[in-house]
């Protein structure tokens, strides 16, 4: 009597999703619960303008946010490598759950902006989150694993813009937005529970803790240049900084363009965003599989080269149907870039440096985002609503050129 072996396809599926347990499962559960309150971010720009702001002040506010991130990220990266990933992630989970409630009661755009800046301190946990994800996924499945985590984490957000749009359509922008903030606070509170109860530490306990944390934190970052230069991490980070600049120049202004130029209602824009999120959820995992199989760098280059013309189509839209087509093309072209990048960075970064390298990556993104949102707000209000989207296209092409000329994938991947 012989034992029948399981089908090869079944074995591949088991291996492919074997990472979806432990910390990855905890992060996915927590993030998916929190994403149910994601409708707050969808209508942030409209509400900010409604209570007294304008596109330029929106850009200035959005510029301040990444500057706070720039200060918080090196501290977070240092803590992640020397004191552990879990502690700082738990702190951020509980810290952020109070801010939606504060948003719900604030009616002055200046106070609203100040709260938004204070909420940004949660970014101290970003290096730890990226590091714990990279620690928990086998190298040969990193892009697929990161893509799968992102999909599961954001899947509930497909319906959240429709909930926010319905609230605004029925109760008005101000009351509807405040109601959405209360719902978001509930989901944020629930999402902190699995992080606190189930998340496990992955940093090596053998790493010696410094005697002078603040001084050594700064010294540890100055010494990282020796580790990053040989493997091209600097160029890789620079390419992502251009992508961050591009996206920051337009993210806050999509809804303003769609509302003020094209003439869409809040509920129509909710429909567009929900379709984008659904498309992203459908495409990201296959894109992760393609990246692991055919090369992360190749997929990243293709993503950048196709996103530039897609954004131009968005600026030419004159109806809901045209906006939907352009928005879906933007998703189809750009959704593969971030998981492939994060996996490629993990491939070239030793585990003991991941928290600090990720912090440097996030810090460069913070500077790029600050510049991008200011350029976007200034050009939108002073020059014209379409100009930020042209800036996006140019920056994406520049990032693609850097990848083509100066980045190569490593022969041996870091564990």
Image (cartoon, helix red, strand yellow):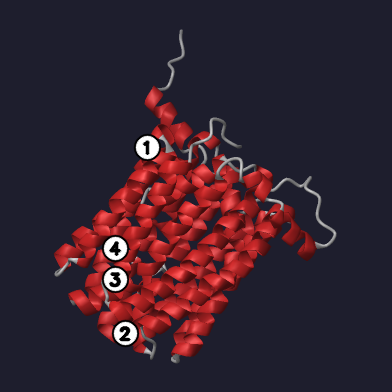
Residue under numbered circle 1? 290
> Which numbered disc flags the more N-terminal residue, 3 or 1?
1
> Which numbered disc flags the more N-terminal residue, 4 or 2?
2
> Which numbered disc flags the more N-terminal residue, 3 or 4?
4
Residue under numbered circle 4? 274
Give the Cα distance between marks 3 and 1: 33 Å
Q: Residue furthest top?
A: 1
- Front disc: 1 or 4: 1
- Front disc: 2 or 1: 1
Residue occupying the point 52% across, 76% down: 64
Helix, strand or loop under label 3: helix
Mark 1 packing: few (<14 Cα in 10 Å), some, or many (20+)?
A: some
Helix, strand or loop under label 4: helix
Residue under numbered circle 2? 173
Q: Compared to 159, does 350 lie above or below?
A: above
Residue occupying the point 46% across, 14% down: 3
> Which numbered disc flags the more N-terminal residue, 1 or 4?
4
Q: Position of residue 154 (x, y in %)?
A: 41, 58
Residue under numbered circle 3? 387
**Of residues 189 and 116, the one drawn nearer to the viewer in this rendering:** 116
Give the Cα distance between marks 4 and 2: 19 Å
Residue 104: quadrant of the picture: bottom left
**Of residues 91 and 332, the one drawn nearer to the viewer in this rendering:** 332
């Amino acid at each position: 009597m012989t034992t029948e072996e399981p089908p090869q396809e079944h074995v591949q599926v088991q291996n492919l999703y074997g990472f979806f347990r432990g910390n990855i499962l905890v992060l996915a559960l927590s993030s998916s619960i929190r994403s149910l309150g994601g409708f707050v971010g969808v209508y942030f720009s409209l509400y900010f303008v409604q209570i007294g702001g304008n596109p330029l002040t929106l850009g200035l506010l959005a510029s301040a946010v990444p500057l706070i991130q720039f200060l918080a990220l090196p501290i977070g990266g240092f803590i992640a490598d020397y004191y552990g990933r879990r502690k700082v992630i738990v702190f951020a989970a509980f810290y952020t759950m109070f801010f939606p409630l504060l948003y719900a009661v604030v009616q002055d755009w200046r106070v609203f902006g100040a709260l938004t800046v204070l909420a940004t301190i949660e970014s101290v946990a970003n290096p730890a989150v990226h590091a714990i994800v990279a620690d928990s996924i086998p190298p040969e499945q990193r892009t697929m694993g990161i893509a799968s985590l992102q999909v599961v984490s954001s899947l509930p957000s497909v319906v959240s813009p429709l909930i926010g749009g319905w609230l605004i359509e029925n109760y008005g922008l101000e009351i509807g937005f405040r109601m959405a903030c209360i719902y978001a606070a509930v989901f944020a509170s629930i999402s902190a529970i699995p992080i606190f109860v189930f998340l496990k530490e992955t940093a090596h306990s053998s790493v010696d803790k410094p005697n002078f944390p603040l001084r050594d934190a700064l010294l540890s970052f100055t010494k990282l240049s020796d580790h990053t230069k040989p493997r091209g991490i600097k160029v890789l980070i620079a390419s992502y900084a251009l992508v961050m600049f591009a996206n920051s120049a337009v993210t806050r202004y999509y809804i303003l363009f769609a509302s003020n130029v094209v003439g869409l209602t809040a509920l129509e824009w909710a429909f567009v965003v929900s379709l984008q999120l659904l498309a992203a959820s459908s495409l990201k995992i296959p894109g992760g599989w393609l990246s692991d199989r055919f090369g992360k760098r190749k997929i990243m280059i293709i993503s950048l080269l196709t996103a530039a013309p897609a954004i131009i189509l968005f600026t030419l839209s004159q109806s809901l149907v045209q906006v939907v087509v352009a928005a879906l093309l933007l998703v189809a072209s750009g959704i593969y870039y971030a998981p492939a990048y994060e996996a490629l960075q993990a491939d070239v970064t030793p585990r003991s440096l991941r928290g600090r390298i990720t912090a440097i990556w996030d810090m460069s993104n913070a500077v790029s985002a600050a510049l991008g949102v200011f350029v976007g707000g200034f050009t939108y209000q002073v020059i014209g609503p379409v100009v930020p989207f042209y800036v996006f296209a140019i920056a994406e092409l520049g990032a693609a050129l850097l990848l083509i000329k100066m980045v190569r994938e490593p022969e041996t991947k870091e564990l």
